[in-house]
Image: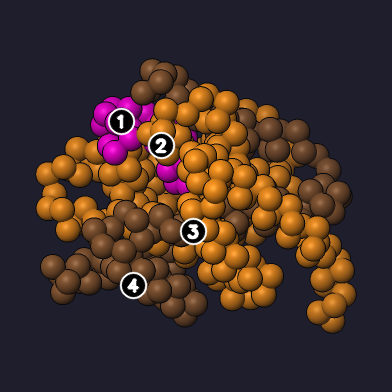
């Protein structure tokens, strides 16, 4: 183990860990509303390490959803990690021990993916473990603290913290929407259809988890047909 | 709760792990199907948008504070604020708006 590389991973992971703590706290409030104990919330966060996925999963729990609904929900909510893993697979050294593929895949998250992919060359597992160690415990502990403290804190503080997770979602969707008109249009359409789905006959009777799955698959498929993504080579040619 | 909470968590964790592990271990070539590539490309933005609205105006004490936080978050993100800053600002905006309102 290269100590220096590990330490630099730790250092880069600290700000991520601080942010995780606040967002996880907000997630803990949702977990509590779904009936999770602090321990259950800790286990869920430590084993999932996924903001949107856990939030979606807690929605299914609150609505007494089936296990099939849960599996589908997590599949759709964490679909982006599939993309990130696919991207990371192109950046692993052929000489890396296979063991690392199985451990590295546990912590593909928006932030840790960004930290690790931003480094030049092959992904360095030692650095990656540093970033994980500095951030993941904060995520798990933060969720448990959210469950415990959510009921102690004044109402208005809980109300304020409950939007932390959505703030994070906004920060992920807006920058690409600024650069890409199709994504910008999609965000507006999603907001409108998602609000409309709460009133539409038949659809409004579905659980909100099922509504999210249906809306996501239908809107993404329509976008893929209407606005197929250009190949990277094609894009490079157009930019020249 | 329909099932034991840990059964739910086990399914969540299992699917979350497989989603990340399978592409990392199985994909050795680039995905070429254009529809699948495009679909996978749009899914993250669509699901996060669908989950954000109208939920953000339903979790706060008043829909007004949630709406103001949404607007503030979008504006800050447009100006390039990072993830944590946007998230913290949304919380602050809700707190201040509700202090004025109630």
The Cα–Cα distance between marks 1 and 4, rounded to whole angstroms, is 30 Å
Residue located beneath label 4 in the image: B68
Q: Main secondary structure of the magenta part?
A: helix
Residue A155 x %, y %: 15, 53
Task: Tell me the element at label 3.
Answer: helix
Q: Is residue A125 above or below residue B63?
A: above
The Cα–Cα distance between marks 1 and 2, rounded to whole angstroms, is 9 Å
Chain to which mark 1 belongs: A
Disc 3 packing (10 Å; few <14; some 14–19; many ≥20): some
Mark 1 and mark 4, same subunit?
no
Instruction: Please identify which colour was used for chain B in the image.
Output: brown
Would you say A114 lies left or right of A54 here?
right
The Cα–Cα distance between marks 2 and 3, rounded to whole angstroms, is 20 Å
Mark 4 and mark 2, same subunit?
no
Residue A144 x %, y %: 27, 37
Instruction: Tell which of A174 and A14 is nearer to you.
Output: A174
The Cα–Cα distance between marks 4 and 2, rounded to whole angstroms, is 26 Å
Q: Residue A189's image quarter?
A: bottom right
Label pair 2/3, CB-CB below 8 angstroms: no
The Cα–Cα distance between marks 4 and 3, rounded to whole angstroms, is 17 Å
Chain to which mark 4 belongs: B
Q: Which mark is residue A58?
A: 2
Residue located beneath label 1 in the image: A36
Query: First in sequence: mark 3 or mark 1?
Result: 1
Chain to which mark 3 belongs: A
- What range is drawn magenta here? A32-56
Chain coloured orange in this rendering: A
Residue located beneath label 3 in the image: A195
Label pair 1/2, CB-CB below 8 angstroms: yes
């Amino acid at each position: 183990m290269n100590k220096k590389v590990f330490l630099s991973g730790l250092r880069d992971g600290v700000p991520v860990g601080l942010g995780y703590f606040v967002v996880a706290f907000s997630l803990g409030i949702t977990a509590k509303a779904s009936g999770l104990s602090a321990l259950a919330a800790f286990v869920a966060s430590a084993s999932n390490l996924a903001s949107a996925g856990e939030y979606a999963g807690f929605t299914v729990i609150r609505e007494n959803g089936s296990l099939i609904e849960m599996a589908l929900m997590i599949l759709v909510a964490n679909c982006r990690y599939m993309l990130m893993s696919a991207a990371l697979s192109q950046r692993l050294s052929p000489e890396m021990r296979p063991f690392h593929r199985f451990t590295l895949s546990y912590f593909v998250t928006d932030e840790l993916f960004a930290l690790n992919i931003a480094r030049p060359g092959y992904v360095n597992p030692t650095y990656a473990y540093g970033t994980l160690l500095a951030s993941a415990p904060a995520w798990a502990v933060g969720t448990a603290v959210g469950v415990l403290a959510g009921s102690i804190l004044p109402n208005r503080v809980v109300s304020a913290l409950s939007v932390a997770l959505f703030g994070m979602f906004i920060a992920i969707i807006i920058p690409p929407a600024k650069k890409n008109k199709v994504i910008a249009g999609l965000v507006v359409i999603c907001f409108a259809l998602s609000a409309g789905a709460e009133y539409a006959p038949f659809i409004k009777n579905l659980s909100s988890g099922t509504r999210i799955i249906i809306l996501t698959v239908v809107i993404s498929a329509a976008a893929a047909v209407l606005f197929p993504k250009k190949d990277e080579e094609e894009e490079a040619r157009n930019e020249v | 709760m329909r099932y034991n909470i840990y059964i739910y968590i086990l399914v969540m964790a299992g699917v979350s792990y497989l989603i990340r592990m399978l592409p990392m271990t199985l994909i050795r070539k680039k995905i070429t199907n254009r529809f699948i590539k495009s679909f996978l490309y749009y899914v993250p933005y669509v699901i996060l948008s669908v989950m954000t609205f109208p939920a953000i105006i339903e979790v706060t004490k008043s829909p007004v504070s949630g709406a103001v936080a949404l607007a503030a978050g979008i504006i800050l993100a447009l100006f390039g604020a990072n993830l944590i800053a946007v998230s913290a600002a949304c919380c602050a905006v809700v707190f201040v708006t509700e202090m004025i309102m109630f």
